[in-house]
Image (cartoon, rainbow, N blue to C red):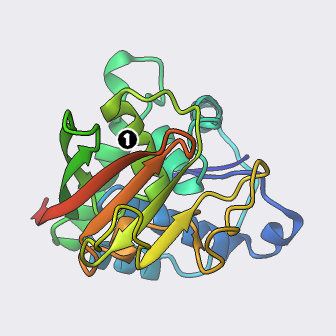
Amino acid sequence: MLVFMNDACRYVIVVQKPMARDWKRLPQLFKETLCETLLKEQINPDVIDRYIGDMGEITFAANSGRQKTAWLNKASANAWYGLYSYGDNACLSVYASHMNVDYAIDDRGKPSNMFKKMMMKRYGLPVIKSRAFDLAIRLDLDGNDAHRRLRVPANMTFEQLHKLLQNAFGWKKYHLYSFGVFKEWSDGYYASPDIELVLESDQYDAYECNPDAISISGVKLDDYVPEYKKILYTYDFGDDWRHYIEVENLIEMAAN
């Protein structure tokens, strides 16, 4: 891992498994990862743009100081703890920035909170600007359907939504899955979706049934919602558990 830490608030940015080509564009990679991470934190995009713009040229120098080295070591350890639970750099960075960066229990989440206070003081704009969707979910159980209601961030990925649905319905993450996106529900139980998102796997050909399907990797809800307000989540292609998801509301919020 490559771990960056803001020495003013100890906010953490993590790049997993950097390749040789990444070292050649390290300043740009840092900015890209920082931007993605702050968007995950629901930071106001206008604040992010100003902050990135104020950076100027990024340079690198040898570290000095025992205290900063200790903080960076702790930040690296936090990132390591979350490495196998968070597949993308932005989610892992958020995780590391919400862990404690010292050994005091009340230090947990301090880097993220300090960073937001710094941004509010510097720019005088609402720091948080978030969008969320209210979802109504029905698991088809032949007349004994199970229902859940969830409020989720608009920039949540479909892979993250899969994990959330697994927890919400008590599944065990044993089987494959896919998402179908609809503008309106079509007639017929197995009607083709307007867009199908599939999980690429060595276990089967994800595109065999639908060559026009799209890889689910990195796709976010707001890439399609609210233009598409109906989502079908199919889990376990043997038993074919079908979860019908309807987007009921779009919530927008700004706050300091």
Residue 250: x %, y % from top left: 14, 67
Q: Height in image: 171 above or below 242?
A: above
Image side of residue 39 versus residue 68, left or right? left
On the image, numbered disc 1 is attached to which residue? 164
Q: Position of residue 142 (x, y in %)?
A: 26, 39
Looking at the image, residue 230 lies above or below residue 140:
below
Question: What kind of residue is marked 1?
Answer: Leu
Res 128 seen here: no
Q: Image height check: is 57 above or below 101?
A: below
- Pick whichever, 77 or 67, lies toward us: 77
Q: Nearer the viewer, residue 71 or 228?
A: 228
Q: Is residue 34 visible?
A: yes
Q: Position of residue 58 (x, y in %)?
A: 63, 73
Q: In percent of the image, x 40 and y 53: which residue is there?
A: 233
Nearest the eye: 186 or 73: 186
Residue beneath the point at 36% across and 17% down: 105
Q: Specify the quadrant of the image occupied by residue 165.
A: top left
Does dot 1 land on a helix, a strand or a loop? Answer: helix
- 118 vs 70, left or right, is left
Q: Residues within 10 Å of mark 1 (few under 14, many from 20)?
A: some
- Total numbered labels placed on residues in the image: 1
Which image quadrant: the C terminus? bottom left
> Looking at the picture, how far across and down is residue 203, in whole percent?
76, 48
At x 37% / y 32%, what residue is drawn? Answer: 167
Q: Is residue 82 above or below residue 231?
A: above
Q: Is residue 56 left or right of residue 171?
A: right
**Quarter of image, res 238:** top right
